[in-house]
Image (cartoon, grey):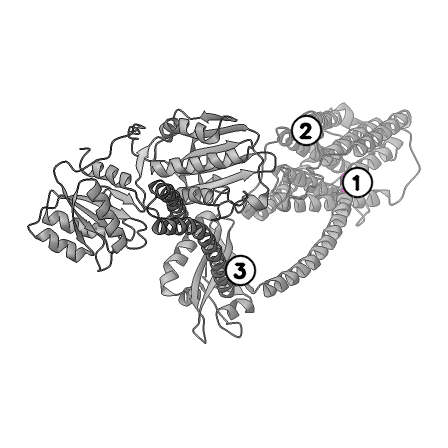
Amino acid sequence: MPKNAGISGLSTFADAGPTRLQTRFAAVVSLAFGVLTLALLPIAADPIGAMPGFVPSYQAALITVYAVTTCLFFAQFRRTRSVPLLVLAAGSLCTTEIVAIQLLTFPGLFGPGRIIGSGPGTTTWLWTLWHLAPPLFALPYAIMEGDQRPRAVPSHRVARVGGLTALAVTAVVAALTWIITDYVDYLPRSVEGDKYWLLTTSGIGPGVVVLTVAALATLCWTTRLRSVLQLWLAVSLLLLVLDNLITLVGAARGTVGWIAGRLEALMAGIIVLGVYLREVDILYGAAESAAEASERQRAELEIARDNFAVALEAADMGDWTLDLATGQARRTLRHDRIFGYDSLLPRWGLADFIGHVVTEDRALVEAALARAEDESTLCFQCRITRAGDGAERWIDVRGRLYRGADGRPATLAGVVIDTTDRREAEQRLNQSQKMEAIGQLTGGVAHDFNNLLTVIVGNLDMIVRRPDNAQRVERLATSAMTAARRGAEVTEKLLSFSRRQVLRPETVNPNHLLKDFQGLLQRAVGETVALILDLDAALDPVRLDPGQFESAILNLAVNARDAMPGGGTLTIRTQNLAVTPERRGALSDLTPGNYVRVCVIDTGLGMDAATAARVFEPFFTTKDVGKGTGLGLSQVYGFARQGGGQVRVTSAPGQGTTITIDLPRSAEPAIASLRTDALLPLRRAVEGEVVLVVEDEAAVLEMAVESLSELGYRTLTATHAAEALDRLKGPERIDILFSDVVMPGGMNGVELATHARTLRSGLRVLLASGYTGSALGEQGVPVDLPLLNKPYRREDLADKLRLVMGGR
């Protein structure tokens, strides 16, 4: 904004720069008057004929021009508060008053003699004073405008300062008039009759010229005539210089020089006034254009408001504006209808709104309102009790905070939406989608297990019918065992996807697991696929189940291998990841914090968007029938989500696939890898150890007893926890408690282990579980209790017993 611009910011000719055309026109005017003055100098002293009425007409015109200019200067000062403009206004007022007083010194204009003064000396001295006023006031204006420092009067003092300035100028003019009229005889003589050659010879006239030239030079030098006002003020001062020259050369009233000087003096005032009037015309035109634009905007705004109201009505939204100072709100009828009112209430405030919010949600609403002062946005959902029928409804409130001129919160404005019906529709849709997913899941499970059971039942049937051929029985039993193990893998992957498998997390460095696992991965992908491990040496530790992690990576590697039938490159990359609030757009499932990222990247066939969107669905597969269960990526998904992280897929046809797993960083140090590929012999009973087997399923109990007997253990049995505790209270030797986790009777295996250790402090415990479900709540199986996953083989049982017995 220009420094002299008013509050509205409109540029005026006091601060607007002149156009090239205006500069050229000012030069032409100056040159024309200069040439005219030079042309008249030789005849400046020649007398002209009598011109009755010239003096009063000329003086009246001069008074009018300067009076109007004075009013315009003071008006612009009131708008801009500019001190330099106030100086020009004071100079214009001074000139107006002196010219008006000079008019009263001419004889015969308002009476038979002079109203003021006693002779032509008074008139000449007043002429000298009014010619001194423009340069005297132009000098300080030029100096102040030259450094371009803003000088403004405080807005609350504008009227007072302007009035005092006008009074001061009037007082000075009155004092000078009194001195000239009463003490003119003591002043240097400047006129004899109608001739004022003495004005030149006394040095008074040349002094006025020198002062005017000095003011003109200062104005041009300091301001470089940057504004329209400065440009035409310079032209006005030049005309006053020409006026002084031609007048002094003429040296008498009624000469060519005297007439030319009067006209140039008049033009000096008219030029500034004319520029001002031109500005008024421009501003009037701008005001008309602004009014037309404002009317168009008003009409467009009215249409927009109507459209907005229709849109809000169609969307079942009510808009509101809350005055934070009074706590009262303006709102629409739709707003009040959401709260159960048929007509618009006369008053509605924040307390009324809070009164409708259900008690449990009021703290949430108050916290959201408090946050709005810092974040400038309001967004929350809550429940309200509707007036009239007392129904409980869900609403969504969105708004924005607006601050006042002092920066303090002033108003909140926004909309309120009744989302009850939408929520109910979403719940029905979610339920429908869940039922569809369950149908797909159960169909897939039934299909796979029917195939597996066909193998198991068929082989066992053939064994039962012809058990005499040992070689045939072994072959059929091996086939049945293979099918059973595939069934166990399917179950494990389903539990992983549902995030219900029992994890044994350890704080490890994934790099170490991948390096230990590299040989198996290379064998899994084959020789046509190049395996690259791009591992971050500064990788943070992660708390995870090493077995589940390796299973997830193996599943991804096998999928990548199948996507590269002609060979390719499989890259496994690790890196640290910091999730900040600003980066949560693409990582919406992760809370801000530090994570470890594992990427499995292949150069295979890739997938389209529709396929990529379904890859984590159970039993979804793009492989041929019999080539995959569709549970590999489901297991990866469940592993990542149960570990507090997320998994994402990025793929495009022909551009390969990238699977990204993000897992939370652990604050604990990583433990050393205890992985070993050495095969250990089966752990057998060495001292006649006795195992108490607790299992409610008779067939499973029988199998467990048989396996333990083959390993050399003596066994005792119980079908529920109470029976087991009775055994433990007895005198029988019991070295190991081998119990199922989920059992009937109100006590699970973990609780049984706790009670058993109370009864027998040195008792060893081994738990077995196929699926803990909700039996253990959120606690799970304690880390200090070894767990054997069902189904298990005799070898698996022997390995766990080795762990239970401390490696013996």
Q: In screen coordinates, is 187 left or right of 796?
A: right
Q: Please, is residue 678 above or below residue 616 in the view? A: above
Disc 2 or disc 3, which is closer to the eye? 3
Q: Is residue 801 above or below residue 344?
A: above
Instruction: Decide whether residue 442 is among the magenta residues.
Output: no
Mark 2, residue position: 223
Three-letter residue code for mark 3: Val
The answer to whether 397 is drawn above or below residue 405 in the figure is below
Q: Which of marks 1 and 3 is nearer the N terminus?
A: 1
Q: Quadrant of the N terminus?
A: top right
- Looking at marks 1 and 2 on the same chain, the residue that comes earlier in the sequence is marked by 2
Image point (24%, 47%), residue name: 704
Label 1, label 3: how many angstroms apart (C-alpha)?
60 Å
Q: Which amino acid does label 2 sit on?
A: Thr
Residue contact at pointers 1 and 3, CB within 8 angstroms = no
Which element type, helix, strand or loop, lies under badge 3? Answer: strand
- What is the distance, in whole Å, between disc 1 and disc 2 at their CAs? 22 Å
Mark 1 belongs to which amino acid?
Ile
Q: Residue beneath label 3, please? A: 415
Quadrant holding the C terminus: top left
Give yes or no for residue 271 being in the magenta stretch. Answer: yes
Give the x, y percent position of residue 86: 63, 40
Compared across the picture, whether 391 is left or right of 707 comes to: right
Q: Where is residue 451 in the image (x, y as percent from the top left)?
A: 45, 50
In this picture, which residue range is highlighted in magenta?
Answer: 270-274
CA gap between label 2 and label 3 equals: 55 Å
Q: Quadrant of residue 360?
A: bottom left
